[in-house]
Amino acid sequence: MLRTARRENPPLLLWAKAGDNRGGAYHPLLHHMLDVAACADRLWEHALTPAARAQVAQAFSFNEDEARRLAVFLAGAHDIGKASPAFQRKVPELRMALEDLGYDFDDRGITGVHHSIVSAWVLSFWLREALSWERCTARRLARVVGAHHGSWPHAGALADLKDKSLADVGRDSIWSQSREYLLKALAEVVKPPRGVHLTSDLEMQNGVLVLLAGFITVADWLGSLEDYFSYEDARLTAEEYWAIARERAQQALKATGWLDAWQGDRTVLPFDRLFGFTPRPFQEAAIRLSEKVAHPALLIVEAPTGQGKTELALYLADAWLQTRQGRGLYIAMPTQATSNAMFGRLRRDFLARRYPGQAGSVVLAHSYAEDVLPELLGVGEDTGEVVAVHSWFLPRKRALLASFGVGTVDQALLGALQARHHFLRLFGLAHKVVVFDEVHAYDTYMERLFENLLRWLRAVGTSVIVLSATLPEETRKRIVSAWGGRAEDLSEGVPYPRLTLVTPQEAQGTAALASKVYPLPAPPNREVQLNWLTLKEPSQVAKWLAERLAQGGCAAVICNTVDKAQTVYEAVRQHFAPEERLLFHARMPFVWRTEVEERVLRLFGKNSERPERFVLVATQVVEQSLDLDFDLMVSELAPVDLLIQRAGRLHRHEPKHDPKHEAERLHHHEKIERPNGLKKPQLWLLSPGDSLTAPDFGPSRFVYAPYILWRTLLALRSRSALHLPADTDELIRAVYRPWEGDSDPLVTSLDLAERDILARRLEETWADWQKQTEYAGSQAQVRLIVRPDKDVLPESWAEALDDDEEALKHPDLKALTRLVDPGVTLLPLHRQRDGRLTLEPEGEGEVDPMLQPDAEMARRMRRYLVAIPHGELGRLPDLPETPAPWRRVVGLRHAVPVIFEEGQARIGAWVLTLDREFGLRLRKERTS
């Protein structure tokens, strides 16, 4: 093939793929360009919705066919930068053949510029000169093409190619002539439009640039699958090979699930057909207001826990997708645990009922997703009758491309950060409906990321549903403003529960948005008895619980830190039998935590195996999205909105006696017989001391802002009950209002001689909170991509931050989705008497740190990882090193082995104890 290419046409000797290069085999660059163009041609039809295709066409004032030819040509041209000395020198045998034909290689001058940078540089001139594309349009689309490896080409790197890196692109004309030949051959097949001019509307422009960047990247990935695009004879003409490439592209897309991509049929099913019961009044009202709106739309639903917000969101998402032929659905949850629970709910309870027998793809998207999917799917489960899990979509960066997905909000937030392939995540979410659940769980840093993500989701045609049990008014306004609505248009004082809707005013064009807030029917008020426990010692709390549950009952004790939960549980052990107690937190091997979570759901979920007497001691893991029911709850003081969330787990599964919802009652609930004394829900708060002017918040002050804890204490101190949802708005407004000095209602209402002292200290904590808020905002700002309405994204790119969750890098170099101590990931190993190291204390799962684990063993090892904040171990100066073989394994490359002997290990001054009952306990020994 080398001699044939040399004799007939030298540019065909330029290679794109060479494998191990035995015998000089290679895949010609022109063929690879046509492979990717063919994949793009198929993707245009199967991956882009009619609305997405129209969005691209509108940005260039094209018809759809012209837009298709533009996108396909850009995808095909993605690797033109490989026609350069910097790339072609990599295979010695092929380089020698090129040198025989007169191609020069200035080894002393070549700096090793990546071929994607060369692609952007070449196209910025060629598109303008050969196709008469407008100058700025050519430059920006060239950068879109150059981004296909994850980062937008940096302006400095492009400028260098004019002088000091000229050797990388080739000084002699043979290189430029070869690139000209390849691009013209591609153009003759694809027929790109001439005179292209991109819209001056900045938001529309940015949205389309992101869509094209993601589209080209996916086409390149598919066109690089050697199982479908084998090496071919370089003598084939571009037209001859184009026919082959199109057929292979069809096969590749079918095998990877793209041809089976979910498509709606414009049929909207009634609510009762989807869920087996009629909608509640609040759901009915929300559907009436939101079912038929212009898109992209933003919907915020604020309603109490247990009222069916999830079913409402699924119904509306499906209705919206059907009416506008959207691409699919992604549900963003606050944690991995809530993601796992929602994944099963979406897949089995909704998709299997809504789309039986229809192919498609559904994925779970978070750090441990690939490791837990087999258990969540069920061993040997037949997935042929419902939406399937296509393996091509499983890797983290491809997960959001699937038709349906559930995962952590972090996976979506990375789309708004300066992270590699951020545009691929936005492309994956484009023209879908994205549901953000438990938004009240976001801190200030996450809120700023979320706001920028909302701007970009609107720019790429995505509709958003935000769900929250409680939401401060200022947060609601910021969300509306981020979407582009006018927060000042929102009516004041609309009662809770409520719905906020921001939609385009079609009569005034897409730039005009209408922002409105509507009241929703409130469920009957439920009274939660509120009491304070002045017991200071965990042993006293445990004894009190034993007395309180003497006649039976199920109680939850919610602690704000793992250490506190472990201490309380130690005391609980003295009063409750093993079958009457359980500890649930996140500081344990993931596989153990999953087992505990499953047991918690079996004990306290809907229609559960409810025990006669039980105490669950837990951290905030039970606060979010887990559908649990307790008779009584003891909680450390937390922000009032989170306390309302926690209280939502009290008597949650009470049967509804509304005849209209009898089917739902029978489907979901069996009557729970509660012991005497626990017939009404009870919330007991652990008092932070007797003094209002100097409360002792303990370690909770490092978890939550003392200003908010203090105001929560003041707002609840005189109450004997919570009436929910009636009290929700009043309490949240009282706690989250800015400091107003001596006129602050929470201060003026106190009859205290020390009122001035209290006011002064509250003002100090307010100032501290503002500093923390400003710091969180500034940290978000330096990591965010530009706003779509403020700057041209490809031309404002600085440097890609690392989105590797494992990497032990300085936080400034990471695309953090949460502003927390970066932490360290431990892999506990247990030394057996015979010297073996195992994953389980009992001796199962042998591990040799000196050997690289195979794929199955690596998956198993990842399930035993434990993430620890650095702060908890004083930054671990004596931390063991990651074994060299592990550094080559995804998910283990930064894992630190800690060897336990009889359940105990030491790292410097720290003693670590690990067992299934307590998880990982940390104790620092005192130094003399």
Image (cartoon, rainbow, N blue to C red):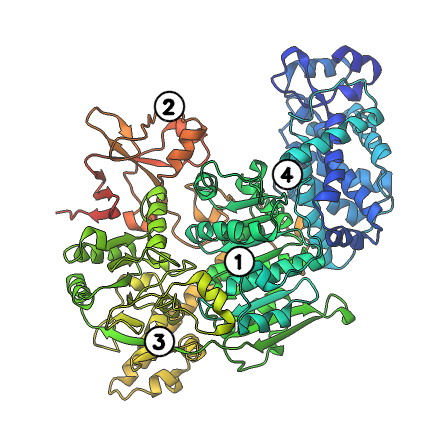
Q: Quadrant of residue 457?
A: bottom right
Q: Is residue 464 visible?
A: no
Q: Quadrant of residue 320?
A: bottom right
Neighbor class of circle 3 (other Cα within 10 Å; few <14, some 14-19, many 20+) is many
* Left or right side of 892 for 693: left
Image coordinates of residue 730 in percent, x first then y, are 43, 80
SS at circle 2: loop
Q: At x 83% / y 23%, what residue is drawn? A: 237
Query: Disc 2 or 3, which lies upstream in sequence?
Result: 3
Q: Disc 2 residue type?
A: Leu
Location of mark 1 (residue)? 449
Location of mark 2 (residue)? 851
Task: Establish if 750 lies above or below 573.
Answer: below
Q: Disc 1 residue type?
A: Leu
SS at circle 1: helix
Q: Disc 3 residue type?
A: Arg
Residue 472 versus residue 782: which sits nearer the camera? 472
